[in-house]
Image (spheres, rainbow, N blue to C red):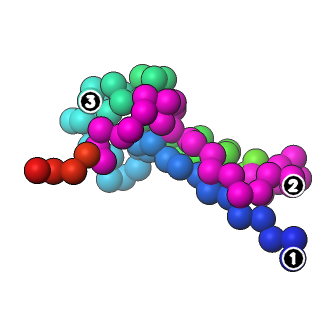
Protein backbone atom coordinates (compact mmCIF):
# COMPACT_ATOMS: atom_id res chain seq x y z
CA UNK A 1 0.00 0.00 0.00
CA UNK A 2 3.03 2.29 0.06
CA UNK A 3 2.61 3.23 3.71
CA UNK A 4 5.81 3.64 5.69
CA UNK A 5 5.86 3.47 9.47
CA UNK A 6 8.83 4.65 11.49
CA UNK A 7 9.30 5.89 15.04
CA UNK A 8 11.69 8.11 16.94
CA UNK A 9 12.81 7.00 20.38
CA UNK A 10 13.60 10.05 22.46
CA UNK A 11 16.05 10.63 25.23
CA UNK A 12 15.55 13.64 27.49
CA UNK A 13 14.40 16.66 25.49
CA UNK A 14 14.35 20.20 26.87
CA UNK A 15 10.73 21.39 26.79
CA UNK A 16 8.64 23.64 29.01
CA UNK A 17 8.31 20.67 31.41
CA UNK A 18 12.08 20.10 31.64
CA UNK A 19 13.41 20.52 35.17
CA UNK A 20 16.77 22.37 35.13
CA UNK A 21 17.47 21.15 38.66
CA UNK A 22 17.96 17.67 37.20
CA UNK A 23 20.38 18.86 34.51
CA UNK A 24 23.47 17.16 35.96
CA UNK A 25 21.75 13.80 36.45
CA UNK A 26 20.16 14.04 33.01
CA UNK A 27 23.47 14.85 31.35
CA UNK A 28 25.04 11.77 32.94
CA UNK A 29 22.45 9.55 31.20
CA UNK A 30 23.46 10.81 27.74
CA UNK A 31 26.92 10.11 26.27
CA UNK A 32 26.74 13.50 24.55
CA UNK A 33 26.58 15.02 28.04
CA UNK A 34 23.40 17.04 27.58
CA UNK A 35 19.70 16.69 26.91
CA UNK A 36 18.35 17.19 23.41
CA UNK A 37 16.64 20.17 21.88
CA UNK A 38 13.24 20.10 20.15
CA UNK A 39 14.88 21.25 16.91
CA UNK A 40 17.05 18.11 16.94
CA UNK A 41 13.96 15.92 17.16
CA UNK A 42 12.29 17.93 14.41
CA UNK A 43 15.33 17.50 12.16
CA UNK A 44 15.22 13.71 12.54
CA UNK A 45 11.49 13.65 11.77
CA UNK A 46 11.95 15.98 8.80
CA UNK A 47 14.53 13.56 7.42
CA UNK A 48 12.20 10.58 7.89
CA UNK A 49 9.36 12.25 6.00
CA UNK A 50 11.62 13.56 3.24
CA UNK A 51 12.61 11.93 -0.04
CA UNK A 52 16.04 10.93 1.27
CA UNK A 53 14.40 8.43 3.62
CA UNK A 54 11.90 7.00 1.12
CA UNK A 55 13.26 3.46 1.55
CA UNK A 56 13.33 3.54 5.37
CA UNK A 57 10.42 1.58 6.78
CA UNK A 58 9.77 -0.12 10.10
CA UNK A 59 12.69 1.61 11.81
CA UNK A 60 12.99 2.99 15.31
CA UNK A 61 15.44 5.89 15.17
CA UNK A 62 17.03 6.81 18.51
CA UNK A 63 17.17 10.57 19.00
CA UNK A 64 18.65 10.22 22.43
CA UNK A 65 22.21 11.54 22.47
CA UNK A 66 23.46 7.96 22.74
CA UNK A 67 21.43 7.16 25.83
CA UNK A 68 20.28 3.77 24.48
CA UNK A 69 23.92 2.78 23.97
CA UNK A 70 24.29 2.59 27.77
CA UNK A 71 22.00 -0.46 27.84
CA UNK A 72 18.81 -0.75 29.86
CA UNK A 73 17.35 2.59 30.87
CA UNK A 74 17.96 3.11 34.61
CA UNK A 75 14.67 5.01 34.84
CA UNK A 76 12.72 1.94 33.68
CA UNK A 77 13.69 -0.24 36.63
CA UNK A 78 10.79 -1.52 38.66
CA UNK A 79 10.30 0.26 41.96
CA UNK A 80 10.33 -2.22 44.83
Q: Farthest residue toward the left?
A: 80
Q: Nearer the viewer, residue 46 or 67?
A: 67
Whether residue 8 can be seen here: yes
Name the disc covering residue 54, or none: 2
Magenta stretch contains residue 59: yes
Q: Which residue is mark 1?
A: 1
Name which of mark 2 and mark 1 comes first in the sequence: 1
Whether residue 67 can be seen here: no
Q: Quadrant of the N terminus?
A: bottom right
Q: Quote the CA–CA distance across marks 2 and 1.
A: 14 Å
Name which of mark 2 and mark 3 comes first in the sequence: 3
Q: In the drawing, does residue 69 fall left or right of residue 26?
A: right
> In the rendered structure, which segment of residues is drawn in magenta?
48-76
Q: Are marks 2 and 1 in contact (CB under 8 Å)?
A: no
Compared with 23, 79 (above or below) is below
Name the disc covering residue 25, or none: 3
Q: In the drawing, does residue 19 fall left or right of residue 38?
A: left
Q: In the drawing, does residue 58 fall left or right of residue 56?
A: left
Q: Residue at x 24, y 35 (%)?
A: 22
Q: Residue at x 87, y 47 (%)?
A: 52
Q: Residues within 10 Å of mark 2 (few under 14, many from 20)?
A: few
> Element type at marker 3?
helix
Amino acid sequence: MGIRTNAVALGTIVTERYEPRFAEATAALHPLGRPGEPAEVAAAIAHLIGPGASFINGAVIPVDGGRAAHGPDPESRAVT
